[in-house]
Image (tube, rainbow, N blue to C red):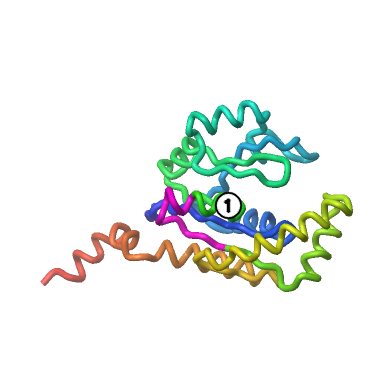
């Protein structure tokens, strides 16, 4: 099986941009890649499952995990906490998987400080109007929450300049192709290819 160097990909976006759908499609269209399962203090939603969508914990347990330095990153988003387990990510990379961290810009900054070689991607909506339309049509939030999310989007989007790649989610298939191109490019880097094709290189350079 080819070596992919077990990269960590940070993918961030403002709420309503379509990040979750893109990340799901990306993980289903490539081999040896998995989506990180975060810990959260927010209530479980209809259709979600413990250990599949998130690991659901109360605020007391979450703060204990912070004190014990168990998170690779953690952040407060609105009224809830989210965090990525160091142990979980390390286990996935040891098993030969690239890992996607679907987190906000705050978490991305923490990851970059601890894992400098991680690759960060920010997904933008095609327009402010389209972002609002998507928030309204997904039927997850009431009017007040939509206003809060649109207000927060200004600051979130301003941090896109700190990321390695920027993808515009106007047409879903195009955005997905862009994401796959980023992953495949990383997998073709010298450090992986020299391992994957060690025998070929030896044959081609033998005098």
Question: Relative to 99, is 134 on the left or the right?
Answer: right
Q: In which quarter of the image is the C terminus?
A: bottom left
Residue 30 occupies which quadrant of the picture?
Answer: bottom right
In reply to whether residue 18 is colored magenta, the answer given is: no
Question: Relative to 50, is 149 on the left or the right?
Answer: right
Q: Give the range drawn in magenta.
A: 111-121
Please tell me whether residue 14 is drawn above or below residue 185 in the rendered image. above
Which residue occupies 86% across, 52% down?
A: 144
Extreme-left residue of the structure: 207
Please tell me whether residue 41 is drawn above or below residue 191 in the rendered image. above
Task: Return the residue nearer the eye: 118 or 183.
Answer: 118
Report x, y in % for residue 143.
89, 54
Residue 137 occupies which quadrant of the picture?
Answer: bottom right
- The residue singled out by tag 1 in the image is 106
At mark 1, the secondary structure is helix
Task: Return the residue nearer the eye: 191 or 124.
Answer: 124
Report x, y in % for residue 191.
32, 60
Please tell me whether residue 124 is drawn above or below residue 1 in the rendered image. below
Count the marks. Answer: 1
Report x, y in % for residue 188.
39, 65
């Amino acid at each position: 099986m080819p070596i992919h160097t077990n990269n960590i990909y940070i993918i961030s976006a403002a709420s309503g941009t379509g990040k979750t759908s893109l990340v799901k499609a990306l993980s289903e269209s490539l081999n040896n890649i998995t989506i990180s399962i975060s810990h959260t203090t927010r209530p479980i939603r209809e259709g979600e499952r413990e250990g599949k969508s998130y690991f659901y914990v109360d605020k007391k347990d979450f703060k204990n995990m912070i004190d014990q330095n168990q998170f690779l990153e953690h952040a407060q988003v609105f009224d809830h906490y989210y965090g990525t387990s160091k142990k979980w990510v390390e286990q996935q990379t040891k098993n030969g998987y690239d890992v996607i961290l679907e987190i906000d810009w705050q978490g991305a900054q923490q990851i970059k400080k601890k894992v400098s070689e991680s690759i960060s991607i920010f997904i933008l909506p095609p327009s402010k109007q389209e972002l609002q339309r998507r928030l309204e049509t997904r039927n997850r939030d009431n009017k007040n929450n939509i206003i809060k999310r649109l207000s927060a989007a200004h600051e979130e989007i301003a941090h896109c300049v700190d990321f390695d790649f920027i993808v515009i989610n106007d047409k879903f298939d195009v955005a997905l192709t862009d994401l796959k191109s980023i992953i495949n490019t990383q997998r073709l880097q010298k450090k992986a290819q020299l391992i994957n094709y060690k025998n070929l290189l030896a044959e081609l350079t033998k005098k």
